[in-house]
Amino acid sequence: MIGAGPAGLGCAFDLRLRGYRVTIFEAERRAGGMAFFGIPRHRLPREALLKDLDVIADLGVEFRFGVRFGRDISLADLKKQNFSAVFVSPGLAGSLRLGVAGDDLPGVVGALEWLHQVNVEGLATVPPRVMVVGGGNAAVDAARCALRLGAREVSLLYRRTRREMPAIKEEVAAALAEGVRLVELVTPEQITRAPGALSIVCRHMRLGEPDVDGRRKPEPTDETHAMECDLLLVAIGQQSSVPDDALPNVPRDRWGRLVVNRATGATGDPFVFAGGDAVTGPATVVEALQSGKCAAYGIDAALSGDPRRVMVEAPRDREALLAEPRYRPVAVEVQQRQQQESLDAAEAVRSFDEVERGLDAEQAAAEARRCLACGLCATCDNCLQNFGCPAFFRVDGKVQIDPLLCDGCGLCVQVCPNGAIVPVSEGAS
Ligand SMILES: Cc1cc2nc3c(=O)[nH]c(=O)nc-3n(C[C@H](O)[C@H](O)[C@H](O)COP(=O)(O)OP(=O)(O)OC[C@H]3O[C@@H](n4cnc5c(N)ncnc54)[C@H](O)[C@@H]3O)c2cc1C
């Protein structure tokens, strides 16, 4: 296993349960991947994470820390050491650079590298004025950490608007409540060192037509303005630290991601399986875990020579789907979601204490009793990602159907596993 992040740990866990001996080579001095080095403590308390890591260690997984694949160890070395297969999940631990003049000046730092310092090395202070460029989780987490470390002013610069930010919506709202200032529709174009500060020339943007993800594309305008800060954190994207020649027979897509069979993690090289962010691009802990589990099945099937061991459900055919009986809720009593306690924003920024305090036992039981098969959209994204109809798009996190592009074929009604799409007659609002 290469990398002790969620994907590697998920794969190791399942392979141990299947009776294999598992060794994880990890470049850092501890396990957890971005769940440890990236996600800050105020969102993921370390006691909870360490408990899960202990479970995996207790299963008898061997960890070799401080070993970087591609530098300290190669595929040839692993073969020589008689490993039967390798699962590669190094994630995307490097921040992309801005690619503008001055992006290498002191004080311009990748957000992931900075979060690593905060989470692992215990960075204790920040200068008074911090700017973060980006709109994803790393950007929002960096901004909220900067506030907690005592920054007086924290601004988040994003080239689209709040509505298009890919970060978790609740986290954006919490960041703004805590005092982060969002500057929308700007992108840094040039950075210079002014006496005692960084000066950033920002290009104003406007929103154009939607791109393939349905998000409106930012387009430059003629206007610019200059802003000043003491520290500029860059969170505009992530890249892999594994050199291409370390995995010579594993194809990559145009973004440099490893190409695998998603059901088994198999690559073009029969010795190598892969998963996690290095395959999907920046995703989530759960998706990384799932890819590790799929690869555990894939590795087991390949090593045992028994393809029936691959237990991932194959895509079902349309005829079978159409014939399937559907759950139709008749009378469902609406029950409100339980609200968890969370720290007040003014109090939250004073420490790294967990902000969302979870549900108590009674609330958890009430939440578990709520009907979750209410027939409404569960944002599984089957319609957007697998169905392929151009009429589907997303606005504010909700899936919508463009009435001009919809020709009323009705297939989506069958395709939605939650029964959230119902046919309406022409002219209905
Ligand atoms: C700031 C931030 C906030 C996030 N917030 C959330 C969230 O709220 N919810 C959520 O679900 N997801 C969140 N994510 C995403 C989530 O953390 C990742 O999708 C997930 O950790 C990916 O798992 P992985 O195992 O593929 O990679 P990683 O977690 O990146 O783990 C890869 C591991 O491989 C090691 N490694 C790298 N290169 C080598 C090498 N050459 N040799 C040996 N070891 C190597 C790394 O040190 C690391 O331990 C966040 C990510 C970031 C950065």
Image (cartoon, rainbow, N blue to C red):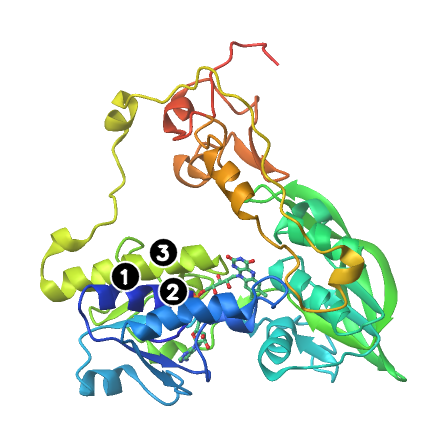
Q: In the displayed structure, does residue 221 sit left or right of residue 258?
A: right
Q: In the displayed structure, does residue 426 sit left or right of residue 125?
A: left
Query: Which residue is the extreme one toward the front?
Result: 362
Q: Is residue 180 visible to us here?
A: no
Instruction: Estimate the spatial distance between the alpha carbons at disc 1 and disc 3, rounded to whole Å.
Output: 9 Å
Circle 2/circle 1 CB separation < 8 Å: yes
Along the line of sight, the residue nearer the viewer: 271 or 344: 344
Q: Which mark is drawn over residue 290?
A: 3
Residue 69 location (% of width, % of height): 37, 82
Q: Earlier in the sequence, mark 3 or mark 2?
A: 2
| SS under mark 2 | helix
Answer yes or no: disc 2 within 8 Å of ligand 1. yes
Q: In the displayed structure, does residue 81 sit left or right of residue 335?
A: left
User: Mark 1 sits on what residue?
Assistant: 295
Residue 159 lies in what quarter of the image? bottom right
Q: Is residue 327 visible to us here?
A: yes
Mark 3 Cα within 10 Å, few/some/many (few <14, many 20+)? Answer: many
Q: Residue 300, relative to residue 84: is it above or below? A: above
Amino acid on which the number 1 mark rests in the picture: Ala
Q: Residue 305, relative to residue 83: is it above or below? A: above
Residue at 62% across, 14% down:
429
Residue 137 lies in what quarter of the image? bottom right
Q: Residue 320, relative to residue 208: is it above or below? A: above
Residue at 29% across, 23% down:
322
User: Mark 2 sits on what residue?
Assistant: 7
Instruction: Estimate the spatial distance between the alpha carbons at disc 2 and disc 1, rounded to whole Å.
Output: 9 Å
